[in-house]
C-alpha cells in the first residue's frame, strides 16, 4: 500500500526545486525592475523555511545532530561557492587586467584593506564588553574582505549598465575577487599571536618570534604565494589545452562552456588537499585562463555561466537563512543587543567608506566624490565572512589545555560567531535594499513636485483636448514641457510659449512684388507693413482676462501641391 516517504532528501529536493521555480517566475521583475538581488530574497526564504519557522529545512538533522559537522558542512559549502564564483569573476575581466591595473589594485588591497581591518577592530573593541584588542583583530579580519557575490548587484544587470561605468565595474570585480583570498594574512596574524602570546606564553612556547615566523613562512609563503603560483600554472595549462582541443574540434559546445566551472571545482579540491588558499588560486586561475581574452569573448553571449552563478547564489543564501543563529543575537553572554545593533551600523558606515574617499584621487577608475562614496559604501560582507568565520572556529578548537579550550580564548568563539553573523546579515539586508530604496527616495520628491506644480497651474479655461475629426484653429505649446495644457499669458515676448497654426494657415508673410521703379526705401517700408500684419499682437483685454492673438488666414503649401 502506498505510503508517504517524508524523508529529509525528498523534502529538501522538493523545497529547493519549488523555491527556485517560484523565484524564477518573477526573477526578472525582482532584479531588473525592483533591483532586488537573489541573495536577499533567498535569505528571507531560508528564514521562513528554517526550523524556528516552517521547519522544512533542518540542517542539524542532515549532519547527524552534530554542531561540528554543521560547521564543517557550511565551511565546505562556502568554499565551493566562492571557488566557482571567483573563477567566473576572473574570466569576466579583460585581457591582462591584473597586470595593467596593478597600481589601483595595490591601493585597494594594501592601504585600504588594512585601514578597513583596523577600523573595524577598533569598533568591535569599543562595543564588545571586556574584550581584548587582539581578539577584536580576529573578528574584524573575518569581515574585512568584500564579497564578490553581493557585489554583483552593482556590477551586473540594468542598474550597472545604466549607472556604473564599465571601468568602475571591472575594478570592483577585481578587488572583491582578490581580497577574498587575501583575508588570510590578517586573520592568521592575529590567530598566531593569540596562540603564542595570548596567554603569556604558558601553553605554547616561542612567543611573538614563533608567531611571526609562522605568519611569514606558512601564511605568506605556503598559503598565499603557493596559491598564486598554482593558480597561474593551472590557469595557463587549462587555457593551452582548451585551445588545442578547440582547434582540432575535439570539444563540443557544452563542454566548452562548462570548462570554467569544472576548472573551479578542480582547483578547490586540489588546493583543499594541500591546505593552500583555494579562494585566491581560483581567482588567479580564472584571470590567467582568459589572459588573451579568447575564452571571455567566446562565452560573452552565453547564459550557462550566469545560470550556474544564479543557482549557487540562491542555494547558499537559502542555506544561510536556515543555519544562521538568529536566537543568539538576542540571547548570548558576550554582547547585548543594544550594543550589537549600533556595532552593525557603525561597521557598515566606517569600515570602508572613509578610506576609499580619502584615497580615491589616486585610483583613476573612481571619478569624483560621488563615485568614491558609491564604491566606499558598496563593500558588502557576505559569503567570504562566513568562510573565514568557520576557519577561525576550526583554529580555536585546537587551542586546548588538558582537553579544554584555553581560558583566555574561552568566549572568543561565541563573540566571533555572533558578531560576524550579525554584520553579514546587516550587510545582506542593507546592501540588498539600498538601490531600490535609493530609487524610491529619488523618485518620490520628483513625482510630488510634478504633481504639485500640475495642480497649482491647472486652469479651467484651458482649451479642450484634441479630438479626431475636430477642426483645430490654434493652440499654444509650452516648450518648457512642464504643463502643455496651460493657457499662455498675453505676451508676444514669452520665450517659452509660441503659437502653432492650423493646417491651411501660414506663418510666411504674403508680399506683393514691388512696383516698377520703386525705391529701396519703399520696398523696406512695404515689407515692414506686411510683417506687422502677419504677426498680430495679442488683444489688450477680453472678458475672461486672457488675450487671444488674431490669426491670419493663410495657406501652407506643400512641395507636392499642384
Image: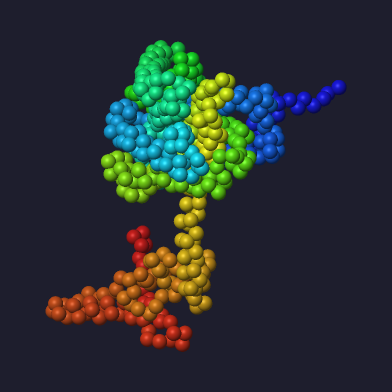
Task: Depth check: give the residue in front, 293 or 429.
Answer: 429
Q: Quadrant of the C terminus?
A: bottom left
The mark total stands at 0
Q: Position of residue 185 (x, y in %)?
A: 39, 27
Residue 533, placed above or below residue 252: below
Quadrant for the N terminus, please: top right
Looking at this view, is 355 or 265 the one in front?
355
Q: Position of residue 250 (x, y in %)?
A: 45, 12
Asked whether the viewer can see residue 180, the reply is yes
Front residue of this view, candidates 540 and 325: 325
Is 520 drawn above or below residue 74 in the view shown?
below
Which residue is depicted at the point 29% across and 73% down?
Answer: 509
Location of residue 99 (image quadrant): top left
Residue drawn at (68%, 38%) of the image:
52
Q: Is residue 38 found left or right of 55 in the rendered image?
A: left
User: Which residue is at 23% across, 77% downward?
Assistant: 527
Of the pair 321 and 347, the residue shown nearer to us: 347
- Colour setup of the view: rainbow
Q: Is residue 269 above or below residue 541?
A: above
Q: Is residue 482 above or below residue 377?
A: below
- Residue 560 x %, y %: 36, 59
The answer to whether residue 91 is seen in the rendering is no
Q: Residue furthest right?
A: 1
**Residue at (37% x, 84% y) in the render:** 539
Q: Position of residue 110 (x, y in %)?
A: 33, 33
Amino acid at each position: 500500500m502506498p505510503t508517504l516517504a517524508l524523508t529529509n532528501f525528498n523534502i529538501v529536493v522538493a523545497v529547493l526545486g519549488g523555491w527556485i521555480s517560484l523565484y524564477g517566475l518573477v526573477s526578472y521583475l525582482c532584479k531588473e525592475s525592483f533591483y532586488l538581488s537573489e541573495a536577499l530574497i533567498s535569505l528571507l526564504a531560508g528564514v521562513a523555511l528554517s526550523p524556528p519557522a516552517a521547519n522544512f529545512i533542518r540542517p542539524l538533522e542532515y549532519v547527524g545532530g552534530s554542531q561540528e559537522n554543521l560547521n564543517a558542512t557550511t565551511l565546505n559549502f562556502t568554499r565551493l561557492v566562492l571557488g566557482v564564483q571567483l573563477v567566473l569573476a576572473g574570466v569576466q575581466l579583460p585581457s591582462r587586467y591584473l597586470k595593467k591595473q596593478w597600481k589601483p589594485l595595490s591601493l585597494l588591497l594594501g592601504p585600504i584593506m588594512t585601514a578597513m581591518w583596523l577600523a573595524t577592530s577598533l569598533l568591535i573593541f569599543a562595543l564588545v564588553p571586556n574584550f581584548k584588542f587582539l581578539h577584536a583583530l580576529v573578528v574584524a579580519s573575518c569581515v574585512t574582505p568584500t564579497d564578490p557575490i553581493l557585489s554583483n548587484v552593482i556590477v551586473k544587470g540594468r542598474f550597472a549598465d545604466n549607472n556604473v561605468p564599465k571601468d568602475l565595474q571591472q575594478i570592483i570585480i577585481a578587488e572583491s575577487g582578490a581580497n577574498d583570498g587575501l583575508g588570510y594574512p590578517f586573520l592568521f596574524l592575529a590567530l598566531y599571536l593569540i596562540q603564542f602570546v595570548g596567554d603569556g606564553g604558558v601553553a605554547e612556547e616561542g612567543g611573538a618570534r614563533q608567531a611571526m615566523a609562522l605568519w611569514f613562512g606558512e601564511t605568506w609563503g605556503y598559503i598565499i604565494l603557493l596559491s598564486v603560483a598554482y593558480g597561474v600554472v593551472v590557469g595557463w595549462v587549462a587555457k593551452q589545452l582548451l585551445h588545442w582541443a578547440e582547434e582540432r574540434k575535439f570539444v563540443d559546445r557544452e563542454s566548452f562552456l562548462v570548462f570554467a566551472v569544472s576548472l573551479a571545482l578542480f582547483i578547490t579540491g586540489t588546493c583543499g588537499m594541500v591546505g593552500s588558499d583555494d579562494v585566491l588560486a581560483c581567482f588567479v586561475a580564472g584571470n590567467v585562463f582568459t589572459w588573451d581574452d579568447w575564452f571571455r569573448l567566446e562565452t560573452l553571449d552565453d547564459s550557462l555561466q550566469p545560470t550556474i552563478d544564479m543557482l549557487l547564489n540562491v542555494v547558499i543564501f537559502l542555506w544561510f537563512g536556515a543555519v544562521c543563529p538568529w536566537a543568539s543575537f538576542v540571547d548570548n553572554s558576550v554582547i547585548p543587543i543594544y550594543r550589537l545593533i549600533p556595532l552593525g551600523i557603525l561597521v557598515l558606515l566606517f569600515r570602508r567608506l572613509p578610506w576609499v574617499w580619502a584615497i580615491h584621487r589616486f585610483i583613476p577608475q573612481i571619478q569624483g566624490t560621488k563615485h568614491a562614496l558609491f564604491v566606499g559604501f558598496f563593500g558588502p560582507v557576505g559569503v567570504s565572512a562566513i568562510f573565514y568565520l568557520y576557519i577561525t572556529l576550526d583554529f580555536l578548537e585546537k587551542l586546548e589545555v588538558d582537553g579544554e579550550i584555553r581560558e583566555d580564548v574561552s568566549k572568543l568563539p561565541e563573540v566571533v560567531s555572533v558578531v560576524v553573523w550579525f554584520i553579514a546579515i546587516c550587510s545582506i539586508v542593507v546592501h540588498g535594499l539600498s538601490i531600490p530604496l535609493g530609487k524610491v527616495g529619488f523618485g518620490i520628491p520628483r513625482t510630488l513636485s510634478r504633481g504639485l506644480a500640475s495642480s497649482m497651474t491647472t486652469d479651467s479655461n484651458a482649451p479642450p483636448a484634441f479630438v479626431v475629426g475636430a477642426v483645430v484653429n490654434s493652440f499654444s505649446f509650452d516648450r518648457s514641457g512642464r504643463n502643455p495644457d496651460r493657457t499662455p499669458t498675453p505676451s508676444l515676448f514669452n520665450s517659452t510659449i509660441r503659437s502653432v497654426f492650423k493646417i491651411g494657415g501660414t506663418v510666411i508673410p504674403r508680399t506683393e512684388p514691388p512696383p516698377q521703379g520703386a525705391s529701396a526705401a519703399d520696398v523696406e517700408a512695404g515689407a515692414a507693413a506686411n510683417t506687422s500684419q502677419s504677426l498680430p499682437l495679442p488683444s489688450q483685454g477680453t472678458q475672461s482676462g486672457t488675450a487671444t492673438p488674431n490669426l491670419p488666414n493663410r495657406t501652407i503649401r506643400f512641395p507636392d501641391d499642384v
